Amino acid sequence: MLKESVQTALNEIRPALQADGGDVELVDVSETGVVKVKLTGACHGCPMGVQTLKMGIEKQLKQKVPGVSEVIGT
């Protein structure tokens, strides 16, 4: 259930990333609420990728999905 909620929230975030030529893929969601994602496209290897991950994706997921504790990139 948590994984489905995270995927739905990522689908809402995705258009903003795609507008800049990037994207995000859900890799895994642990039982403790740690979400693993992979940045792709222009986001992969971007110097601002960590900020996008923490200040953008993590912040949004924590607001939209109760139970998300952290978002990490793979």
Image: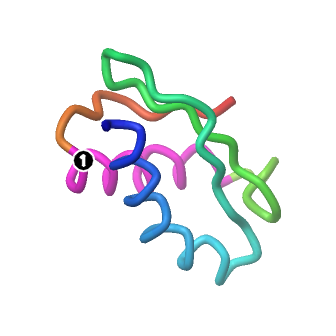
Amino acid on which disc 1 is placed = Val
Badge 1 element: loop
The span picked out in magenta is 48-65
Give the residue at mark 1. Answer: 65
Tell me: residue 2, above or below residue 15: above
Seen in the picture, residue 47 relative to 18 is either above or below; the reply is: above
Relative to 10, is 39 above or below? above
Q: Is residue 6 on the magenta stretch?
A: no
Q: Look at the magenta stretch and give its main secondary structure.
A: helix
Q: Which of the 4 quarters of the picture holds residue 3? A: top left
Q: Residues within 10 Å of mark 1 (few under 14, many from 20)?
A: some
Q: Residue at x 40, y 24 (%)?
A: 34
Q: Position of residue 63 (x, y in %)?
A: 20, 53
User: Which quadrant would the C terminus be assigned to in this image?
Assistant: top right
Quadrant location of residue 23? bottom right
Residue 6: x percent and y percent?
Answer: 39, 47
Foreground pick, 42 / 35:
35
Instruction: Please give left or right for residue 2 compared with residue 13 in the image.
Output: left
**x and y, in percent, of residue 32 in the image:** 31, 16
- Left or right: residue 9 compared with residue 28: left
Residue at image point 65% right, 49% down: 25
